[in-house]
Amino acid sequence: MQFDSLINKLNGMASDFLFLDGQKLDIPTSGKFLNQLDEVIQEAQDFDIPLLIQTARAMAHILEKFILDAVDSKEDAFKQIESGISLMQRIADSFQNSGEYTGSIQDFLEAASAISGAPIPVEGSQAEDQPQPNALQSVDETPEQPVSPPQEVEIQDESLLKDFISEGLEYIEEIEVNILNLEQEPGNKDYINTIFRPFHSMKGVASFLNLETIRDLAHNLENLLDDARNDQLQVTPPVIDAVLDGADALKMLIGQLKDRLAGLPSQALDLDLKALMTRINKVRQNDQQTGKKLGEILMDEGVITPEILEEGLKAAKGDPPKKLGEALIGEGKVTPRQVSQALRKQSAQITDTSTIRVDTQKLDDMIDMVGELVITQSMIQQDIKNQLTVDRNLTRDIAQFFRITSGLQRLSTGLRMVPIKQTFQRMSRLVRDLAKSTGKQIAVEMEGEDTEIDRNMVDEIYNPLVHMIRNSVDHGIEPAAERIKQGKPEKGLIQLKAYHRGGNVVIEIVDDGKGLDRTKILNKAVKNGLIENDEGMSDQDVFRLILLPGLSTAEKITDVSGRGVGMDVVKQAVEKLRGKIEIESAPGKGTALVTSFPLTMAIIDGMIVKIGPERYILPTSAIRQAFRPQESAYANVVGKGEIINVMGRLMPLVRLYELFNIRPERMVPWEAIVLVVDGESQSKCMMVDEIIGKTEVVIKNLGERLKNLRGVSGGAIMGDGQIGLILDPEGIFDLSET
């Protein structure tokens, strides 16, 4: 029994809940959690886990009461939801490991009942024995039923309905934009998911607001897109048309609800929901997914004429009705062979697709195997160099093998890289939501959204980016009135940038706000005992103080930030990925939060260098230049240390043998080799004995005990089977300055 999907859903809920601010649950967020609970219940029913079903349903009751402001204590309700998520995780983990859960959920059910007012189910009984009349069940028990006819709904909470109307119309605008993008790129899963999510959220919120017509239509459109994102349905013009028409229908229904809420008379809608639903179901069944219909294919082949086709269509509509091919065969107009060939061509149009789904574990295994192949290639190359004579044909064959291996390596490495565009789009939506909640006007610009990052990093960097966005919105961007007084545009600007530099992926979040207040940061740091004074501290040193735990200069706590936590969490998350964060700021100009992460691809281009008896690997992308300097280019400056004049620019010299306590072969720079290496914000010269050559190496983790080793980012197996350490330029720079 596979519980991976269920456990991943629960872990996702726990992660989302963890990053909620206080006890704030708005309409979109609550709808998302209700949908997630809906999915958990469905999977728990498949796995026959009644305790998990009961826990999820009890949580749904609490969540609905919470949003309707029908609980005595929101704090208690919030804690109970958090407790329920943790309980569901324990139940699922226990079933995965032992096939049962021996603990009790009765205390949780009683507490949930006290908060929500829902009856307490009998612990351990089958969920089917105790039907729970909630919105979650009503959505999925009849997923294929046509939508309910437009109806008058009882308005119980005007504020909730206003929020839903506002969010719903924004969702539809988002759908309309992305459906046009999808039409240009039908195979783009990012666009499909971006369109799927708004329908998913509208379904969940409409469900607990008892907006059955909107709920049913959104649910069926969601199912259509779910088929597309699971590769069960090809995105074709009929699919695009169905989604657009469905979105238009939802807009009309929400508009009708808006008019009623405003006290305006309800206008009759020119909307045939039954016909629309029939059409959506036909599209899902591939009835309209052919590029050409059977009759068109037969005409293109010259088998029938338009007149014969028209007669065949009339015959097909007789009593009893027939399929077109059957009618044409019955009339003697075509042969079964001709119809069979035409149907095969039609089927080929339906099933033709350029993408398939692949288990990510299989992908990782393949990349590991390609890595081992590259290692073997290096060993073969080393063995050939040691041979005095090598057969010419063998040399040619091995050269071809190397070319194939390199191509396979590039292809496999690219498979695990994804553009950061989707992450940036999520950040853009977050800015909009936060701006709305804080009453500020903020625009977002994205640059370098096509920059690719390792897919394993996508989830890891999301939460740090969320914290930084919150910080920029709350602490950085000023209110519109204040910006106007300062001569700034009324609307603030947050820029999201991504690019590759020095063998790293760099992500910047830049705002044009008020910037950091050096004096305020120092006063708070002194007050908290973090420093005694600012003697010798640069602006960069002072700004980095905000990354320390408990240091917040916010004058008041808000729903967005200002609790004295956040930036220290960012620092910890970034360092967990062996990344770094830098802060640049100017009063009145704004702040830039610059994070950089090492490339976590399995294979990198590296330059092998030798220092004494040891060999090290530097990322080729970080090396700008290699040369043997003249003696006159070397100097030792008081207060600055050793420097090398590189084409008129003075750069610090780093003697690697001193950092690693190795006896080198060459101790003076003009006899050794000097490499100009780029770091995050500076460049330095590294001195080595010699350069052995360029190679492709497979990054190997050094394990838990050595994962924080400064100056080293990993290891690699060399061509002769020995281990070489991969150097981290920025870490080396830090070591050289201590």
Image: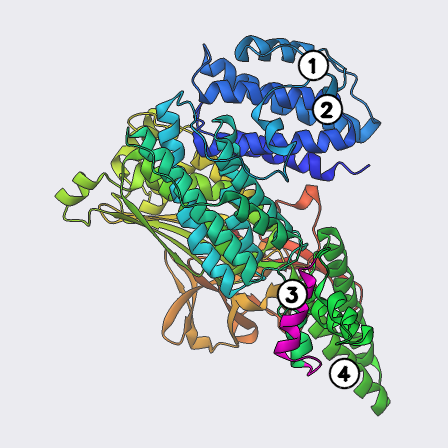
Circle 1 SS class = loop
Q: Is residue 442 above or below residue 304?
A: above
Residue 55 lies left or right of residue 482; in this view the side is right
Residue 284: x %, y % from top left: 63, 52
| Residue 106 figure quarter | top right
- Which range of residues does the magenta coloring cover? 301-318
Which numbered circle lies on residue 91? 2
> Is 317 covered by the magenta stretch?
yes
Residue 655: x %, y % from top left: 54, 61
Say whether marks 3 and 4 touch (CB < 8 Å). no
Which residue is at a point 31% across and 45% down the rendered structure image?
539
For badge 4, the amino acid type reads Ala
Q: Nearer the viewer, mark 3 or mark 4?
A: 3
Q: Nearer the viewer, mark 2 or mark 4?
A: 2
**Which badge, 3 or 4, comes first in the chain's sequence?**
3
**Marks 1/4: CA–CA distance:** 65 Å
Circle 4 SS class = helix
For badge 2, the amino acid type reads Ile
Q: Which residue is mark 4?
A: 399
Characterize the magenta stretch by its predominant secondary structure.
Answer: helix
| Residue 61 figure quarter | top right
